[in-house]
Amino acid sequence: MSEQNQSSEAVYRRRPDRALGKASEAEQRSALAAYIAERPQLAAFARDMVRAFEEHEAADVRARLAAAGAARKAWKKYEPEVPALILDARAAGVSGVEIAADLGMNPSYVFRILREKVRYSYRIDVFNDPDIGLGWQADENGEGVADANEAGGLADPDRLADEHRQGMLGVRRAHLAARVLMWKGPDMGLDDEAVYVREWPAAEADKQ
């Protein structure tokens, strides 16, 4: 009885889903290709859609490139001011780690600036300049960043004074007696608070 039942029972084997899926995908692609081939307008529409997508992608990339280029140019213009900004932020109580995080910079660069640079301000006076008046008269002033010595002061104030005097007075006014005063920090103080003072008498100025 059991043998008869075994011989009469049907045996079904299910085709693997993967094989079915592959065949279906191939058939679908073939059918879609035939469908589009019979409809040239639809094929042209599909090509236009692909072209529009590619153009959109290209425009998006160009826009990103332009934005990156503009940001780089803006940064290059601002980059020289970064050391002064770092020193001013530290003087205001912002930690080196916080400065680096806010600027998106490596902390080692920030700490190097804090260790090796110093902020200073200066004023150039001239003596008996006919265009300004008799006696010592303030001519120009400004501020900057310079190399620091081990004590945190100006490493080479003589060089800075020479550069500022020559830059401000130039050749036309080089004969005038002049003096340069410097203060630590970006803000000028009183004359007797200056950390550096140097004078060029008129006779000495004529020789330089």
Image: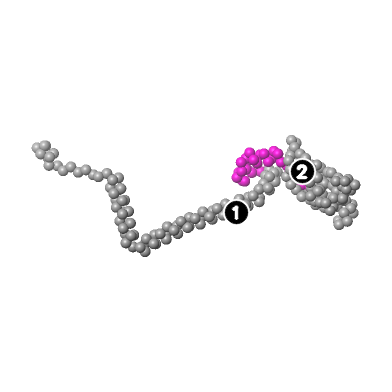
Measuring 55% from the left and 53% from the top, which residue is drawn there? 65
Question: Residue 108 falls in which quadrant of the image?
Answer: top right
SS of the residue at dot 1?
Answer: helix
Please tell me which residue lies in front, 104 or 51.
51
Query: Measured from the top left, where is residue 5 in percent x and y?
Result: 12, 40
Residue where numbered disc 2 is placed:
184
Please tell me which residue lies in front, 150 or 44.
44
Residue where numbered disc 1 is placed:
70
Please tell me which residue lies in front, 99 or 129.
129
Q: Amino acid at mark 2?
A: Lys
176 lies above or below 7: below
Which quadrant of the figure contains the N terminus? top left
Query: Measured from the top left, where is residue 42 in percent x and y?
Result: 36, 62
Residue farthest along the bottom direction in this orientation: 41
Measuring 73% from the left and 45% from the top, which residue is drawn there? 145
Q: Which mark is residue 54?
A: none
Question: Can you see residue 201?
Answer: no
The span from disc 2 to disc 1 (Cα, nearest Å) is 35 Å
Question: Residue 198 falls in which quadrant of the image?
Answer: top right
Residue farthest along the top direction in this orientation: 150
Report the predominant secondary structure element of the magenta stretch: helix
Question: Can you see residue 142?
Answer: yes
Q: Amino acid at mark 1?
A: Ala
Instruction: Give the side of residue 7 with respect to residue 103, left or right.
Output: left
Instruction: Give the side of residue 101 with respect to residue 182, left or right.
Output: left
Measuring 31% from the left and 59% from the top, which residue is drawn there? 35
- For mark 2, does the 10 Å Cα neighbourhood hold few (<14), some (14 to 19), or many (20 or more) residues? many
Query: Measured from the top left, where is residue 142 in percent x and y?
Result: 77, 50
SS of the residue at dot 2?
Answer: strand
Query: Measured from the top left, where is residue 27 in percent x and y?
Result: 29, 52
- For mark 1, does the 10 Å Cα neighbourhood hold few (<14), some (14 to 19), or many (20 or more) residues? few
Magenta span of residues: 93-122
